Image (cartoon, rainbow, N blue to C red):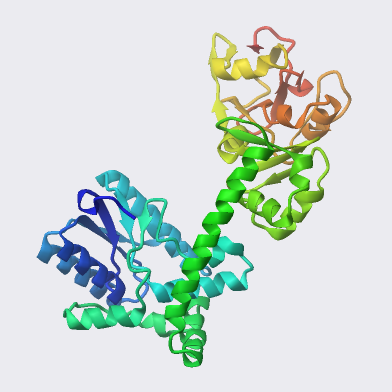
Amino acid sequence: MLHQPQQKTYLLAVSGGVDSMVLADLFQLSGFNFHIVHINYHLRNEDSNLDQKLVFDFCEKHKIPFHLYEVSQKDNQPENSIQNWARELRYRYFREIQQKENLDYIVTAHHLNDQLETFIINLSKASGIRGLSGIPQNENGIIRPLLGFCKDEIYDFAKENHIDFREDQSNQKTDYLRNKIRHNIVPELEKINSDFLTNFSKSINYINQAKVFINQSVDDKIKILKINSDENQIIINKEKFSQESELIRYEILKRFGFNDENEMQKVFTAQTGSLFFNSEFHLIINRNELIFKKKLEVRNENLEKVLLEIIDNEIIIPENIKNEIQEFGNCFWKIDKQKVQLPLKLRRKQEGDLFFPIGMIGKKKISKFFKDEKLSILAKQKIWLLCDVDERILGVLPFRQDGRFSSDNSETELVLKV
């Protein structure tokens, strides 16, 4: 629940449909300090423009700040997965406006029927208790005050209070899974039990209480299993983890973004040296440890590219990167600038990278070179490669230079010292 909601500021997502127009009317009657945001996808020709006009006229009448995003070709609408694309686009814009206007909360008009549809979708995906608990009422700065009301109640409120709204005729189609559930499945459930939605609302409440209990239990287990942690990683005792129930192990992995059941099974039996990735973390299996590292750190290590300056024929390495390199040693390389394409840069290893190590015959994959140097998993992620603009690898810092680009002519040489 929000404390002193009148003192907060809000950004209402308003499409022009009955749900969001009722939401806007309720906020207006309550005297809250809020802005309204509308997305015009231009998917329904003139109907899209009429939706926009309705929302704009409401804002103008009540002197509410109005924010509009009009979708255009630059937004690269896909041929498939339009709903996912549209959702990502609108929430990205919502966050931009929220930050720009310094607003406390984003507010959407999701209601009980949306909750039921989401429950059925997640039930079909075996998404676990988190998925079955449905749409959260208040999470990540997004609040949904209409979740306890069904669609019919919202229609009745709009009619009784003479609230203007527009129907999106595309919602009547059954092209999308959600619409199929809305028009084909939910009516049958309500025929079986006229109180189905009311009972479903109670069930969701019970499931959410169970979720809170399980989350607390998982928090407690992680504290027991934790060996060490800092802001970028947490290390868990692998042996103790394996002795926990399957439910606890699954929920711990989910806490770190590992939701795929097949991947989870692999984690349970993985050998030392195994690596698992997701959008939030990567997991390293290291002897009797499970090391969960934040993806932010991985992103910097694997994707960062640093352009290098050359001053008086010396390649300048930034101090913070030089300190990383010096963990493994020092080097003094001479590179023929006539053999490379400037500018030079540093980057992390990528799949398929290879070079021609000086003093060796032929080429070698960087991955094989790392293995031969007996570098640990964590050490491999810290290594920088020196490359030219054509992505040719000039050396692995500070271990070995590529012999193809070494210099024996002082007039054309670049010097790199670490």
| Quarter assignment of residue 328 | top right
- Counting labels gives 0
Tell me which residue sits at (58%, 25%) in the image: 342
Tell me which residue sits at (56%, 49%) in the image: 216
Frontmost residue, 360 versus 285 = 285
Which residue of the protein is positioned furthest toward the right in this rendering?
Answer: 361
Above or below residue 214? Residue 296 is above
The reply to whether residue 403 is visible in this rendering is yes
x%, y% of residue 257? 60, 50
Tell me which residue sits at (55%, 32%) in the image: 231
- Look at the image and tell me in which quarter the C terminus lies: top right
In the rendered structure, the answer to whether residue 150 lies left or right of residue 31 reads right
x%, y% of residue 401? 75, 20
x%, y% of residue 259? 64, 56
| Quarter assignment of residue 376 | top right
x%, y% of residue 133? 51, 65
Above or below residue 398? Residue 273 is below
In the rendered structure, the answer to whether residue 83 lies left or right of residue 128 reads left
Above or below residue 255? Residue 168 is below
Above or below residue 133? Residue 374 is above
Which residue of the protein is positioned furthest toward the bottom in this rendering?
Answer: 191
- Look at the image and tell me in which quarter the N terminus lies: bottom left
The reply to whether residue 78 is visible in this rendering is no
In the rendered structure, the answer to whether residue 304 lies left or right of residue 268 reads left
In the rendered structure, the answer to whether residue 397 lies left or right of residue 136 reads right
